[in-house]
Structures are given as C-alpha cells and as structure tokens.
Image: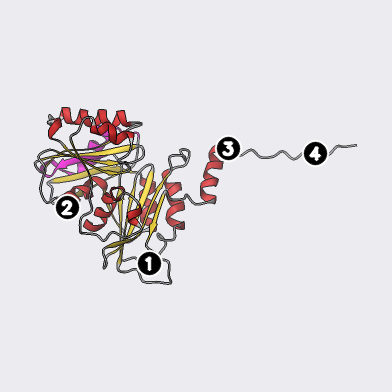
Amino acid sequence: MAGNCWQKEAIMPVSDFVVLLLFGNMLKPDFHISNGETSGSRDDYSQYRLLMELNARSFSYVLLNVRGMRPAVIKYFQWNQFKDSSIDEIMRDIVFEDEILTLPTIGEIFLVYNFPESSLVPERLFHPDLNQPLTDLVYGNLDKGLVINEKIPWWEFENVYRIPANLHKLMQQKFSSGKFWHFYSLQLKCHKMFTAKEENQLMKVFFYSDKMIVMVCRNGQLELFQSFSYQDSNDVAYNLLNCARQLRMEQEEISLQLSGLIEMKSALYEELQKYFLHITFDQLGDNIRITDEMREYPLHYFSSLLKMAICV
C-alpha cells in the first residue's frame, strides 16, 4: 500500500521575503506632517509645488502651497533595514502608491538627487566631453550610472555628477513633467538667496541618519562641498576638524550651522560643543509660513528641504 506523499514546501530566500514584505505593505514614513488641506475632494493642485529629495538610503518630499507659501505635506522615508532591495525597487513602490505622489495636476514638480559622486568644475575648465572621464577618474568606473551636468546659478561652476540610471528612468517615467537638480547645486543657489551677510568662515553641515554633507565657504567663496559617512559622534567631530585643518581654518572662528537629523540634547551635539564655539541651527526666516503641525518638530529637521522648495 502506497503511503501518502508529503508535498515539499517551497523555501523562500530571505532576500525575496524582505522584498515581498516591503511591497506587500508600503514602506511607512518616519515623519508625516500634514495640515489637512489635501484630505478633501480637491482635484486641482496647479497652485502647489512638489519637491522631492532622494539619496541612497532615504527619500523626503514637501508639497508646498505656493500661493500661501506654506507646506501642506512633508514626508520622510528611510530604508536602512532593506539592504537587500535595490533603490529603484523601493522607490517604485513609494512613488506609485503614496497618496500625495499620485495626486493629479500638481503645478510644479522637482526632484533633487543627493548622491555623493559629484564634481564642481570651474566654468572656464568645463567641457561636456570630459564629464565621463572626470567622474571615472575621481570615483572609479565600477558604477555604470548616468553622468550628467548642470550650471549652478550665481556660481561660476558646473556640477558634473553620477546617478543610478535605472532610478532616473523610473523617476522620469513617473514624473514626466518634472525637473531635476543635484543637492549641491540647489543648496548653493539657496545659500545665495538666504544669506544676508557672508560669514568669514562658514561650515554648514546637513545631517542624515548615516551621513553628513559639509559645505564650507570663506568670505562668500566656496571651498568644499562633500559627503562623509559616519557611525558615531567621534566620526563627525574627526571629519569636521580634519576639514578645518586641511582648509587652514581658524577653529575658534568657525561659524558652524547645523540642519537635518540632529538633536540639541544629544551626544553628537555635546561632542561638537567641545570643539566649536559658534554653533547655530539653520533657520527658515520669513520666506515660509510655519504651520502648527510643523512646530511639533525641530524646524531645522526640514529647513534645507523647505528652502530648496522655495528657491527652485
């Protein structure tokens, strides 16, 4: 008598499980701030501007009511836990499922790429035929991404940078009318727009969960724009002090301006206070209306995002 046959159960690889888990339930934002004006039956968003910022480990956006100069929605996603999923897989899920990113008739759409493979080339030395060789020389040629360039307004630089080609194709497919920038380019434009008086020695630091971006200006002249990975406060202090030393800055004269994911009551901030005398958090000023919902968070969390939304 033949016995019953057990059907062999298929084993799902861990990486496939992670992808299915992600797409079966869309990645939840770490921050979601809304003033409620998109929750009704409105079908005309022509007076709104959508600005998105995207890097290898996070994605954020603001939907700005241009007429009222106030943010209607701010969201911030990060996916450090999904190391086995490609960025275009993660972003495909977000951009085609998020209720704001699928709104009709948004008046203006901008995408800011925040990837570190960027070279700021003086205009007099720039030639488009050198974009690829320059990028391969500085950053290597293992990454076969898309190399593009853009003129930085009010600065005599061209930004030559590399981004993931498949990701760019996806974002162009979803936002066909959108325009794109690199983070460095747009932040330099913002610096000109929002700086009333140039500091003698300014060091601006934009903090993310796993990296920081450092911009250094001396008397209005750009000296550095670079990304640094970090794991703890010691890494941050070391890299900032090393930048100051190599650029021959007077440490006690540096104006250190902070924005992004950093808390005043934190080990990181306490570490910075040991070495820098003049520390401030980035401010928004009067260019944008601060909603009650935003006041529940430190405003410097979103200052760089909101400034970019204003000055595009």
Mark 3, residues whose alpha carbon is within 10 Å: few (<14), some, or many (≥20)?
few
Mark 3–mark 2 distance (CA, rounded to whole Å)? 50 Å
Residue type, label 4: Cys
Q: Which residue is mark 2?
A: 194
**Scheme by which the image is coloured:** secondary structure
Would you identify the image quadrant in which residue 4 lies? top right
Which residue is label 3 attached to?
13
Q: How many marks?
A: 4
* Residue tagged 1: 37
Q: Are marks 3 and 2 in contact (CB under 8 Å)?
A: no
Q: Mark 4 — residue?
A: 5
Q: Which residues are magenta?
A: 117-142
With respect to residue 154, does 214 lie above or below?
above
Cα separation, mark 2 vs mark 1, equals 28 Å
Question: Residue drawn 39% across and 52% down?
Answer: 170
* Position of residue 235 measured from the top left corner of the image (x, y, whole percent): 30, 29
Q: Nearer the viewer, mark 3 or mark 2?
A: 2
Callout 1 crowding tier (Cα within 10 Å): few <14, some 14–19, many ≥20? few
Residue displayed at 18% across by 47% down: 188
